[in-house]
Image (cartoon, grey):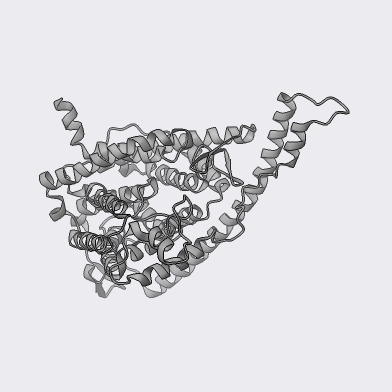
Amino acid sequence: MTAFKEKLRDTSLFRTIYIFDLFFCMISFVQVAAYVCLPFLFIWGLWLVFYNQRRYNTFFKMRFGLWIGAFLIVSLFTMLLNLTETLLFSLVMQLHVLICFFVFYGMHTEPGFDFKRELNLIAKGLVILTTALNVVGFFCLLFGVYFEWNFEDLYWIYFPIYENRFTGVFFNPNLLGFVSVVAVVCCHMMTKDGLYSNSNTRRLGMGFIYACVVINIFALILSDSNASIVLALGYVCVYITYVFFDRREGMTPSRVFIKIVTLLLVLAVFVSSSLMLRTVFKAGFTVITSKTNALVDVLFDDKPIEGLPDKETAEEEEKPEITFDHENTNIDSGRFRLWKESIDLFKISPVFGISHGNIVFYSEEYLSGVLEYSYHKNDLHNGFLTIIVSTGVIGALLFGTFGFRFAKHAAQHLFLRRKTVRAEVYPCLFSFLAAYMGYAFFEKALLYDISFLVMFFWLMMGYTSCYVAKYEHLIETQYLFHQKRLRRTML
């Protein structure tokens, strides 16, 4: 019993189990079982919020806790100001925000916590699971194994193709795209020697890591998830920018100008070539898929009797060719309508917001009803708009101040350290968080959603905060152009 209580008090164990349960919530064939476990884990997380506050004094030791506390107070006031029949949903979201702030981001308040060990364990598990599931999806795609099931539009499985896009065993192609990017980022982190400095965990072989990168990039391209492509390209662009300006000596204005011009050219070539490769690869894989499926039909299907029509063959010929492109030709996939609706929702209560639980309710009650209680239309698909509509201008300013303060301190550790941090995992964390800001413009991300997408972001925030807290003393004042000092307060 004592050992069980110790496990319940283990915040690291909770984060690991919670992340992997949310991961399995995205997989079609085990999704229901994962969702059944989720409420129990949610209660466990809430208990840890209050238990850690009592034993670690989390709130008062948390970096930028003043802004977090003010944001939580405004969110609570907004919820009480907009009492409707969706109060329970707003309350659940408020409790979810507590877990994000205090259990995930607040991990840097836990004394003696080895964040690299936890990061290594989660990264390795996500890489192995995602790669294995994508391999299964590729195998079924190439050999014509398809499965479709729909229960009155409440729960469905389309495997391995969903709306003409590769989805594998995942519930939605956009989810597949996101976890594939996460797997690639985790592979990059596992190549860093600094990740293993305080851990006895065995490394994965470099050959295996490279193979995982290739497989997950293929899955990302075939999912045709535009938001995930933005996340992947953003990650690489931010990391390349860091490499360009990871200087160890003073820089003249001419050097800065040359670096900026060179960087812009490199990024332009990289982005354009990546988009061209995406188009070419999808076209090539379309041909490969059709050929392998035809070969399987020849090997395993019975040949029709000559002179008689074959019904099954006729039906197969009528099926459209899989091209891995959006069936919806609108580049915004309907997001512009949701964003336009968010403006009208914001006008209802611009100062304090309408509370997150009322977004769909107010849309149906007072506006045009663009938002509804369905999988695709129950959110604004923009993390920033969701926050400003939910908590108003005041809440958005408080959350933005917290984000700016965090970003400022995080950026200092890239450029104001006495030694380069390129061998550490930290640049990967920073690059992912920066790229996620662009991703949050297009998806249900950032805060108000109990999903793997949101919690992985806060997990990365937590690891970054641990790094900032641990190595704060190594920050130094640098010279700007050899003469004027660039003080940390200016950043």
**Horizontal relation, residue 70 to residue 210: left or right:** left
**Horizontal relation, residue 480 to residue 255: left or right:** left
Asked whether residue 196 appears in the rendered view, the answer is: no
Residue closer to the observer: 41 or 440 = 41
Q: Residue 133: x and y, percent?
A: 49, 35
Q: Residue at x 12, y 49 (%)?
A: 57
Q: Residue at x 39, y 53 (%)?
A: 432
Asked whether residue 301 appears in the rendered view, the answer is: yes
Q: Residue 206: x and y, percent?
A: 44, 36
Residue closer to the observer: 344 or 144 = 344
Q: Quadrant of the C terminus?
A: bottom left
Q: Quadrant of residue 184?
A: top left
| Total count of labels | 0
Q: Is residue 21 above or below residue 361?
A: above
Q: Residue at x 53, y 34 (%)?
A: 135
Q: Is residue 401 above or below residue 314?
A: below
Q: Residue 234: x and y, percent?
A: 45, 57
Residue closer to the observer: 154 or 120 = 154
Q: Residue at x 84, y 24 (%)?
A: 305
Q: Quadrant of the N terminus?
A: top left
Task: Give the residue furthest to the right.
Answer: 307
**Horizontal relation, residue 339 to residue 282: left or right:** left
Q: Residue 71: x and y, percent?
A: 23, 62
Q: Quadrant of residue 209?
A: top left
Q: Quadrant of residue 241?
A: bottom left
